[in-house]
Amino acid sequence: MMTDTPAPRTGFYPGTFDPVTSGHMDIIERAAGLVDRLVIGVAENREKHPLLPLEERLLCLRTDIEPLNIGRATPITVVGFTGLVVHAARTHGAHAIIRGLRAVADFEYENQMFGMNQHMAPDIDALFLMAREGHQYISSRLVKEIARLDGDISGFVPPFTRRHILARLRG
């Protein structure tokens, strides 16, 4: 008797990740435990004027998630994308788009995006993860500002990303 093996539950976690923060890393780790396969989508969004080009953001994420892939049957993957999140999620076989929420303002924005995404791709759901208390105040924008003003960002970003940002700003 043959049994149908269900398709792996794939989550797509999109963002600009300029830079990836410890809050992002927390969401990645927690999301990886909720899905069979996790794809991190790094958006090419020139309108945001990123500090790090797409290739460097991909490198930082791939390097910083390496420890999370140890012992995983299905590794977390990192891909770049342009265009609509729902198109990228569908391209990678995602059943859910994963988003982190820090505060009420994040919820209002994400709720609106969820409605639009549901209209375009009703087969792709959303999974919202609340930021843990120690990460609710961290934002990529503030991390970049602190780094530009020679502040210590070591508590806000993973080590490889920290070194990469500092080298970029000083070199």
Image: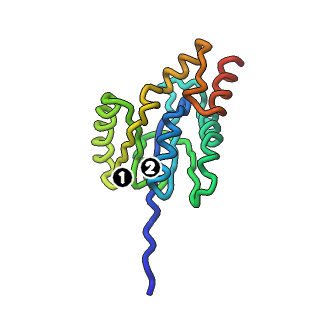
Which x, y percent locates residue 86? 40, 46
- Give the quarter of the figure containing the N terminus: bottom left
Which x, y percent locates residue 125? 34, 51
Mark number, residue 89: 2
Disc 2 secondary structure class? helix
What residue lies at 60% left-to-right and 28% top-to-bottom?
52
Dot 2 and dot 1 residues touching (CB under 8 Å): yes
Disc 1 secondary structure class? loop
Residue hosting label 1 = 124
Determine the residue located farthest toward the front in the rendered image: 133
- Give the quarter of the figure containing the C terminus: top right
Residue type (three-letter) at the residue carrying disc 1 = Ile
Determine the residue located farthest toward the bottom in the rendered image: 1
User: Image height check: is 11 above or below 105?
Assistant: below
Residue type (three-letter) at the residue carrying disc 2 = Ala
> What color scheme is it?
rainbow
